[in-house]
Image (cartoon, grey):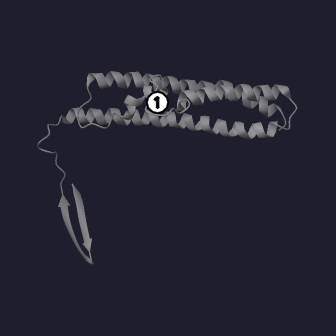
C-alpha cells in the first residue's frame, strides 16, 4: 500500500493506493519470490567481483605512476619487472573487459562478458526461473568465480611481488 499526495496550486489531496497484480496475467508467487532471492544473490556476487575489478584498476593507475618514476631509474631489473607486470595486467584486463572493439554487431562468445551475461538478465522476467535459466546461471556463476579467483591470485601473488620489488628500490 502507498499513500499518494497530489499538490496543485496550493491545494493538496491524499489517497491510499494499493498495487495489485494484473488479473490477466497468471503469477506463481513462490516462483517469483525464488527468482528474486536468486537475483539478489547474483547481485551480491557481481558486487563482490566489482570490488576486485576496482583493485585491478587501482593497480593500473599505480603502475602508470611507477612507470613515470622509473623512467629516471637505470635499474634494468626494475624496468623488466615493470614490463612483465604490465604484460600480465594487460592480459587480465583484456579478459575482463574484452579485446579491441570491432565495427558492426559482434559478440565474442568466449569473452568473460558473454559468459556471465545470463547473470545480468536474471531479474528481467515476471515468470519463475526455468531449469534452462538455472543451468545458464550456474555456468555463469562458475565463470564469475573463476575470474574472481584469478584476480585475487594476481593481487596476492604477482602484484604483491611487484610491489615488494618496487618498494625495495628508492623511487
The residue lying toward the viewer, choosing from 104 and 163, is 104
Q: Quadrant of residue 82?
A: top right
**Crowding near pointer 1: few (<14 within 10 Å), some, many (20+)?**
some
- Identify which residue is drawn at 18% across, 54% down: 18
Q: Which residue is mark 1?
A: 113
What element does badge 1 sit on?
helix
Say if 135 sits above or below 64 in the image: above
Residue lying furthest bottom: 10
- Identify which residue is drawn at 31% across, 38% down: 124
Say if 133 sits above or below 44 in the image: above
| Residue 101 location (% of width, % of height) | 53, 33
Classify the position of the N terminus by image quarter.
bottom left
How many labels were placed on the picture?
A: 1
- Identify which residue is drawn at 11% across, 44% down: 23
78 displayed left or right of 55: right
Classify the position of the C terminus by image quarter.
top right
Q: Is residue 155 visible?
A: no
Amino acid at each position: 500500500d502507498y499513500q499518494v499526495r497530489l499538490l496543485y496550486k496550493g491545494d493538496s489531496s491524499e489517497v491510499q493506493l494499493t498495487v495489485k497484480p494484473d488479473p490477466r496475467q497468471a503469477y506463481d508467487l513462490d516462483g517469483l519470490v525464488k527468482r528474486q532471492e536468486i537475483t539478489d544473490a547474483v547481485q551480491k556476487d557481481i558486487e563482490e567481483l566489482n570490488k576486485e575489478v576496482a583493485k585491478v584498476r587501482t593497480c593500473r593507475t599505480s603502475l602508470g605512476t611507477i612507470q613515470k618514476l622509473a623512467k629516471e631509474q637505470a635499474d634494468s631489473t626494475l624496468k623488466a619487472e615493470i614490463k612483465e607486470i604490465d604484460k600480465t595486467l594487460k592480459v587480465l584486463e583484456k579478459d575482463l573487459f574484452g579485446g579491441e572493439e570491432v565495427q558492426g554487431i559482434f559478440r565474442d562468445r568466449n569473452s568473460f562478458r558473454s559468459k556471465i551475461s545470463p547473470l545480468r538478465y536474471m531479474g528481467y522476467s515476471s515468470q519463475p526461473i526455468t531449469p534452462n535459466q538455472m543451468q545458464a546461471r550456474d555456468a555463469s556463476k562458475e565463470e564469475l568465480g573463476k575470474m574472481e579467483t584469478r584476480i585475487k591470485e594476481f593481487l596476492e601473488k604477482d602484484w604483491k611481488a611487484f610491489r615488494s620489488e618496487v618498494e625495495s628500490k628508492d623511487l
